[in-house]
Image (cartoon, helix red, strand yellow):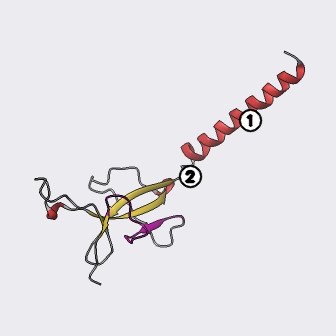
Amino acid sequence: MDKKSKILLIIFSLLLIGSVAFTIYKYGIEKDYLIVGQSSCDPITESCFFIPCVEGDGTCNPADIQYFKKIERKAFNVELCDPAVVGCDPLACFKNEKDCSTTYCSTDTLDDGEECSTSTQ
């Protein structure tokens, strides 16, 4: 291997190591990425998402429909616990929290299989 090839290999290796180290730092240590999740929603006062059940399949119970809104939050602001456990805060944006958004249901925000509830207010 000649001298130019060794230098090129060293530069490429350093760039690769630097890229991996930066990625580990940004996503593993800083947790600088968005968490997208669902939070409970009150269909009486808010326009909520829900997934309708199919009538006639034997498992459809309208009382069991879960209404939700979508939350996007930075990972470093999300509490590390199970929301089903007592004492764990639900996924929600706090007042004036940067890089946090709540998405309510509209025709523009629907995904496949979802529908919007119609609020009465």
Point out the stretch of residues depicted in magenta.
99-114
Asked if the residues shown at circle 1 and circle 2 are in contact, with their CB atoms under 8 angstroms apart, the answer is no
Q: Secondary structure at mark 1?
A: helix
For image coordinates 47% across by 60% down, the residue present is 73
Q: Quadrant of residue 107?
A: bottom left
In the image, residue 12 above or below residue 1: below
Badge 1 crowding class, 10 Å Cα cut-off, few under 14, some 14 to 19, many 20 or more, is few
Q: Which residue is mark 1?
A: 15
Comparing 94 with 54, the one in front is 54
Query: On the picture, is 55 further left or further right than 78?
Result: left
Mark 1 vs mark 2: give the one in front: 1
Q: CA distance from mark 1 to mark 2?
A: 21 Å
Residue farthest toward the top in the current orientation of the protein:
1
Mark 1 is on which residue type?
A: Leu
Q: Which residue is mark 2?
A: 32
Mark 2 is on which residue type?
A: Asp
Badge 2 crowding class, 10 Å Cα cut-off, few under 14, some 14 to 19, many 20 or more, is some
Query: On the picture, is 30 further left or further right than 111?
Result: right
For image coordinates 49% across by 53% down, the residue present is 75
Comparing 62 with 12, the one in front is 62
Residue farthest toward the right in the current orientation of the protein:
3
**Quadrant the C terminus occupies:** bottom left
